[in-house]
Each structure stands twice: as structure tokens, then as C-alpha cells.
Amino acid sequence: MGEKAVRRRPGPLAGLLVAVVVAAGCMGGGLDQGEPEQPRPRQSGEPASPGADATRADGTTSVAEFKQDFSDAVGIAESYWTAQFRGSGEQFQPIRRVVPYTRSGEVSCGGEGLPRNNAVYCSAGDFIAYDVNWSVAAFRQVGDAFLFYLLGHEYAHGVQVRLGIRYNFTIQQELQADCMAGAYIGDNVRSGTLTLAEGDLDEFREGLLAVGDDPDQPWFAEGSHGTAEQRSESFFRGYEKSLDACGLG
């Protein structure tokens, strides 16, 4: 995606997300407490730094492209939310840090090491952390649209904290973040900052249908993100109707 058309990758979005998101754990992250530990976090305006083992020529894209697109996603999110807050007469503080990691437990949130194949927003430290090898693999197979959804969802959790939004159930927090991620992408497409290629909306839809909770997961359980249908409906409600559809008021 980025400030250009989405580059299409071989392989269906849904298949990849089932493999590396659902099987590996929660992509959406949440509002955990804690400060990041090693490695030293980068400032949000700096590019991510994939590890050496992410540079194998085993995909269709380069790590340099990943770094640029991820940097674009962060920068556009900061600009988007700054403008939204300004429009309400408020000042927005961008999320302090975006932390790439390569090993399980390398970054800690609330005293617990983050697992591989994951991304999370940590509220007390005000940072987003993501497994860079997993993200590069997804980028190579899916395309940069994956990065914008991933970053948009986690950034939305940071915005929820800034707005003082805290629901009784995790599922409410997560579905709202999906809606906010949809608004972030949709509004930037409408403004011309981002351009979707033909078929990209279908890929978003297929991917969201693939990352819903297990059918046996109680909706009220801690960590619930919503069914496939709920997540898809929330994202596209935000994509089509912007933030007014996300219950922020």
C-alpha cells in the first residue's frame, strides 16, 4: 500500500493469516502494562530494523522495501491521528516507540516476554512491538496491505488509551480497534494518500474472515477478539463510514 498502489504478492491473504496469526496467537495485542526491555526501542519516526535472518532471498520483496513500507505506515498513522485530534481541538501525542524483535521473550510487557509471531500495543510503555521476521514473511507473501492493517489495529489501541476508552470486555476493545483500523485505511484511500489495487478489498475481507476467534471461544472471555464475521463487519464499517461508525464519541 503506502503512498502508491498495493503490490500484489503470490498466495492468498487468508491462507497466510491462518498460518501465522491464528495458529501463533493474538495479532491484535491489547492494553498490557510494562516497559520494553532489550533491544533498545527505536523512535517512532525511525525505520524498523529487521534482523539478519530476515534477509534471505526467499520471497518476492526485499527487506529494504519492508522497512520503507512499515515506516510509511507508521508515519501515515501519526499524521492521520494528529489531524483527527486537531479537528476536535485536541493535541495528539504519537505512540512513543515501535519496537521490532526477533526472539520470544526479547521484549517484555508487564513483566511477560512477548511470544514470536505476534504484535502488541503495550500501554504503560506506550509502544508497539512486533516480531519482525514474522512480519517480513507476511509482507512477502501478502503485500504491504498486511502491514497497514497490522499497524492500524495496534495504533488504534494507543488511541483508545489516549481517549480514555476502556470496555468491560476485551472483544469490545478489539472490535473497535478493527473499526478504527478500517477508518484509518479508508480515509487515507479517499484522500489519495493510499491507493488500493484491484482485488485488495477482497484480500482484506478474506484475511479478516480468517482471523476470527475459534467458534468455541466465549465472547466474554479475556482475549476474545470477535468472530470472523464480527471482525470483518467492524473493519469494513470503519473503512466505509470512517470514525463516526466506531463509537468513539
Image (cartoon, grey):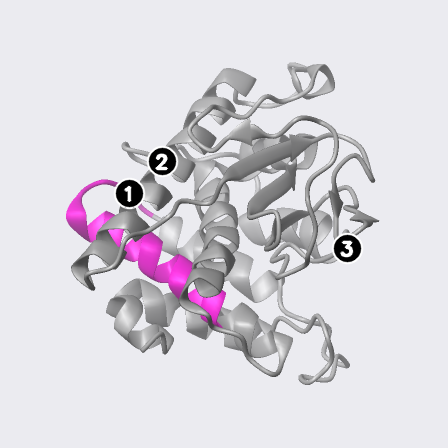
- Residue placed at 30% from the left, 35% from the top? 5
Residue 200: image x %, image y %? Answer: 38, 49
Please, what is the three-letter code of the amino acid marked with disc 2?
A: Gly
Residue neighbourhood size for the residue with mark 2, other residues' Cα within 10 Å, grouped as few (<14), some (14–19), many (≥20): some
In contact (CB < 8 Å): disc 1 and disc 2 = yes
In contact (CB < 8 Å): disc 3 and disc 1 = no
Please, what is the three-letter code of the amino acid marked with disc 3?
A: Ala
Residue denoted by label 2: 75
The residues colored magenta run 176-198
Residue 7: image x %, image y %? Answer: 39, 32
Residue denoted by label 3: 23
Residue neighbourhood size for the residue with mark 3, other residues' Cα within 10 Å, grouped as few (<14), some (14–19), many (≥20): few
Residue neighbourhood size for the residue with mark 1, other residues' Cα within 10 Å, grouped as few (<14), some (14–19), many (≥20): few
Residue 107's quadrant in the figure? top right
Q: Say which element carries label 3.
A: loop
Dividing the image into 4 quarters, which one contains the C terminus? bottom left
